[in-house]
Image (cartoon, helix red, strand yellow):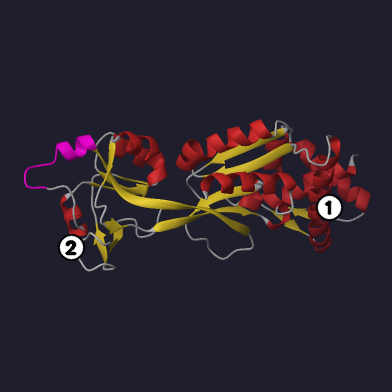
Amino acid sequence: MDKLSAMGTFVRVVESGSFSAVANELRATQSAVSKQVAALEKALGAKLLVRTTRSLALTEEGERYFEQARRLVAEIAEAEAGLIKGEGQLRGWIRVAASVGFGRLKLMPLVKSFMAAHPDVKIDLRLNDGFIDLVEQGIDVSVRIGDLPDSGLIARRIGTSHRMLLAHRDYLRTLPKGVRVPVNPEDLQAHECIVYTGMSNSDLWTFTAGAGALETKGTIKSIHVEGHIQTNSSEVLRFAVTTGMGIGFSPTWLFDAELACGEIVRLMPDWESPQSPIHAVSPPERKHSAKVRAFVEHLSAALT
């Protein structure tokens, strides 16, 4: 038995809570993963896991061993990465998570440039607009937009996402008689608004009066909006806006190319919209990884 390999397998089984998930990661059978953990338990002379048909639980010995094993596995992987091709050489997998739209439009070009600079690094990019448990999924770093809840994760701010009111030129050209292009927040109540449900208070859009607004500068207005489509997908929101289905209240990075050529128009420029922080988030045990640090630095240099 390769004890280090078995130790790594045990750590991932605990993190994911599943033998089958680790089997998929390792492209092995669930039986092989189970046998590897059993062999480790036999070598240690201690029961590490209690298995039931529906769940896994650490024994008291398993809890003590898991914390030490997780640190040791991470440290050995980092040491090997530094020695195989020289201290400055980065190599191995980085598991990265992000939302679908941001991952496709903003993150992929940065992944490409990072891999060009570090040819021995491999990226496992997992895109999902829903919540991902970083520890359970074995994620090294996740890019998250918005305020972060308190957690045991390590976060670094790497940029800012600017949110604006946007519409396609075709939508504005075909407005019904008597409906004007929005100038004030109240005007939105006469419009077809595309609601993104991935945010709290998704149908309550908030704006602050700027220097050019008719209202006193700094005045805050929140407007309930409606429309015939709502979605939890940034890709659906993008499609709906670019095909003239209505007005979106969206991060500008989702429409960079269309804004640059004038296909998509910013509305109500005299009213400021909320900005959201962009963070790179990692589990505590990943924060000392040289390749993760380098990847986060690469993102920060491009997005800040």
Label 1 – label 2 distance at C-alpha? 62 Å
Which numbered marker is on residue 214? 2
Q: Amino acid at mark 1?
A: Leu
Q: Residues within 10 Å of mark 1 (few under 14, many from 20)?
A: some
Q: Quadrant of residue 153?
A: bottom right
Give the residue at the far left of this rendering. Answer: 177
Instruction: Identify the residue position indicated by label 1 in the image.
Output: 72
Q: Residue at x 60, y 54 (%)?
A: 281
Instruction: Say what secondary structure mark 1 lies in.
Output: helix
Is residue 26 placed above or below 202 in the rendered structure? above
Image spot of residue 250 (x, y percent): 35, 48
Query: 221 or 11, which lies in front?
Result: 221
Task: Check residue 77 for magenta coloring.
Answer: no
Q: Residue at x 24, y 55 (%)?
A: 225
Q: Is residue 201 left or right of residue 122?
A: left
Query: 7 or 111, which lies in front?
Result: 111
| The magenta segment | 169-179
